[in-house]
Amino acid sequence: MKIALIGYGKMGKAIERLALEAGHDIVAKVGRGAESSFSLPVDTDVAIEFTRPDAAVANIQACVEQGIPVVCGTTGWYRQLPELSAIISQKQGALLYAPNFSIGVNLFMEVNRVLARLMSQQPHYRAELSEIHHTEKLDAPSGTAIALADDLIANHKGYSSWSNSDAVKNDHLPITALREPGVPGTHGLSYSSQCDEISLTHKAHNRDGFASGALFAAEWLKGKTGIFTMKDVLNLNQLT
Ligand SMILES: NC(=O)c1ccc[n+]([C@@H]2O[C@H](COP(=O)([O-])OP(=O)(O)OC[C@H]3O[C@@H](n4cnc5c(N)ncnc54)[C@H](OP(=O)(O)O)[C@@H]3O)[C@@H](O)[C@H]2O)c1
């Protein structure tokens, strides 16, 4: 594939390394400063966007305007998805976005949905989510923690919303977000009762799982139009 990298930070560099090892070409690298005014080579197969929450929407839009499918890993912009969807549909563009491209995290998310349905019948267990990321991460809680929370709430009758403040109401799912140097991403889910606890943790050892997942998603997106997530890529829609 001919890949354009939008954002050349920690993730952009990890994707470049794995893409070159796999025999792909990097045909453009767009950094801060070009903002949304960049033009990509016309034969670009896919753009992979990992920048900042306040830059992602304009970058995606610029790719769609140029007819280039885009894989977006930036988190913290999803409230703008409805307006972006309208543009993508009008231009018959292609967007694949995910708060987390790691295959392991996406399977964790699936287990979370199933477990929430089981635990919905067991009100004496209280659920909690936690996440730890490196100190440069701008958004908190992480996009992955919010996705886990939204899925849990959708599948558990005991919760109506999530909260990352200290004042947690009974039907609020608590999320704890910590920032520590050098942590690529750790997410934890637990259900505790007076007697016992079920806990599940996903811990990224490095960024390669996110980068290889984004490349896998980019190959999957080739030739498609519409808006997709990792549930489509991993065919999880049929399971839950
Ligand atoms: N979905 C996933 O699997 C996943 C995994 C890891 C991270 N993420 C998310 O991906 C995003 C990037 O993470 P990262 O660790 O790579 O961050 P990073 O190391 O800070 O890199 C971001 C890069 O984007 C550049 N940039 C800023 N504004 C830009 C713009 N308008 N256009 C083009 N480039 C711009 C930055 O340039 P400067 O250095 O000049 O600011 C920097 O090089 C974050 O939102 C993070 O939460 C997602």
Image (tube, helix red, strand yellow):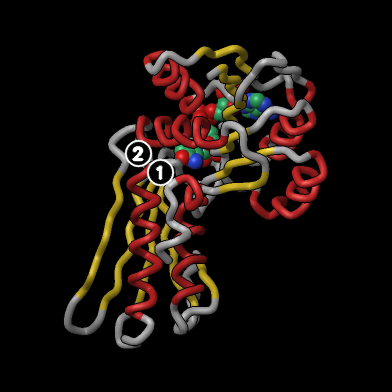
Instruction: Check if mark 2's residue and mark 1's residue have beta carbons within 8 Å.
Output: yes
- Label 1 CB-ligand 1 distance < 8 A: yes
Horizontal side, residue 149 vs residue 194: left or right: right
Figure quadrant of residue 119:
bottom left
Q: Quadrant of the C terminus?
A: bottom left
Lower sequence index among marks 2 and 1: 1
Q: Which residue occupies the foreground of this view, 67 or 151?
A: 67
Residue 25 picture location, percent across and down: 52, 12
Horizontal side, residue 74 vs residue 102: left or right: right
Residue 3 picture location, percent across and down: 56, 20
> Please, is residue 136 above or below residue 39 in the view?
below
Q: Which quadrant of the picture is home to ligand 1?
A: top right
Which element type, helix, strand or loop, lies under badge 1? strand
For the residue marked with disc 1, what is the amino acid? Answer: His
Residue 8 picture location, percent across and down: 55, 21
Residue occupying image coordinates x 39% and y 58%: 109
> Please, is residue 172 above or below residue 229 in the view?
below
Residue occupying image coordinates x 79% and y 22%: 37
Q: Answer yes or no: is residue 137 visible.
A: no
> Please, is residue 31 above or below residue 231 in the view?
above
Residue 6 picture location, percent across and down: 62, 24
Q: Which residue occupies the foreground of this view, 215 or 112?
A: 215
- Tag shown at residue 30: none
For the residue marked with disc 2, what is the amino acid? Answer: Val
Residue occupying image coordinates x 75% and y 35%: 61
- Tag shown at residue 133: 1
Horizontal side, residue 116 vs residue 8: left or right: left
Figure quadrant of residue 117:
bottom left
Residue occupying image coordinates x 45% and y 24%: 15
Which element type, helix, strand or loop, lies under badge 2? loop
Reading the image, the residue beneath label 2 is: 183
